[in-house]
Amino acid sequence: MVEKTTAARGDYRVFYPITTRWMDNDIYGHVNNVTYYSYFDSAVNRYLIEEGGLDIHRAPVVGFVVNSSCDYRAPIAYPQAIEAGLRVARLGNSSVTYEVGIFRRGEDSACAAGSFTHVFVERAANRSVAIPEPIRRALQAIQMENTQ
């Protein structure tokens, strides 16, 4: 049995506001499932840029997404104000698994909770390498307790 990603606001370490867009809604009147992955990616990359110093255009080492998942718990719809909660579930030598919760602003339970894994690669050689130290320090700052 697969363990579900936690969905409580207090379990996440950092939060980013997200502006939903009209185009995020699908024909059923709520945010389409694939849009949540864009929210996850935006929150993680904002953290890596702001806290880890990642230069997405010129850095010799970048993160490639190799795995992702999402559990949908409650619908959201444009124009709701939402937030992405972020934490690190597992930190390895060349990879990191993030957990992201999508919350309606001010609510304690996530509408969606998911995870994805980055493998850090040398851009020129397209091979996995150790996570750069400034990024590693930023990831450790939001890492869950009792993890690798």
Image: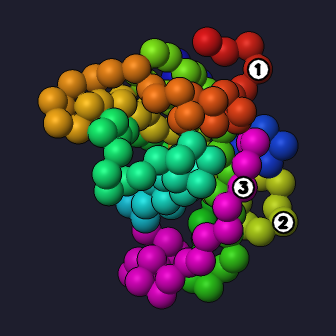
Q: Which residues are magenta?
A: 12-32
| Spatial CA span between label 1 and label 3 | 18 Å
The secondary structure type at the circle numbered 1 is loop
User: Which residue is identified by label 1?
Assistant: 145
Q: Amino acid at mark 2?
A: Gly
Which is more N-terminal, label 3 or label 2? Answer: 3
**Helix or strand or loop: what does disc 2 sit on?**
loop
Q: Alpha carbon of mark 2 to alpha carbon of mark 1: how far?
A: 24 Å
Counting other residues with Cα less than 10 Å from the Cα at mark 3, is it few (<14), some (14-19), or many (20 or more)? some
- Magenta-colored stretch includes residue 105: no
Q: Secondary structure at mark 3?
A: strand
Mark nearest the camera among 2 and 1 is 1
Residue behind mark 3: 15
> Would residue 16 be counted in the magenta stretch?
yes
Find residue 72 and report its horizontal and vertical position in percent: 55, 52
- Please indicate whether residue 104 sits to the left or right of residue 118 in the image: right
Q: Which amino acid lies under the numbered mark 1 shown in the image of this protein?
A: Glu
Q: Residues within 10 Å of mark 2 (few under 14, many from 20)?
A: few
The answer to whether residue 77 is above or below residue 59 is below
Q: Residue at x 67, y 61 (%)?
A: 16
User: Residue 68, position in %: x, y?
Assistant: 40, 39
In which quadrant of the rendered view does residue 126 lie?
top left
Q: Position of residue 85 (x, y in %)?
A: 68, 51
Q: Which residue is mark 2?
A: 106
Q: Earlier in the sequence, mark 2 or mark 1?
A: 2
Task: Classify residue 21 as left or right of residue 103.
Answer: left
Rendered location of residue 101, percent (x, y): 64, 49
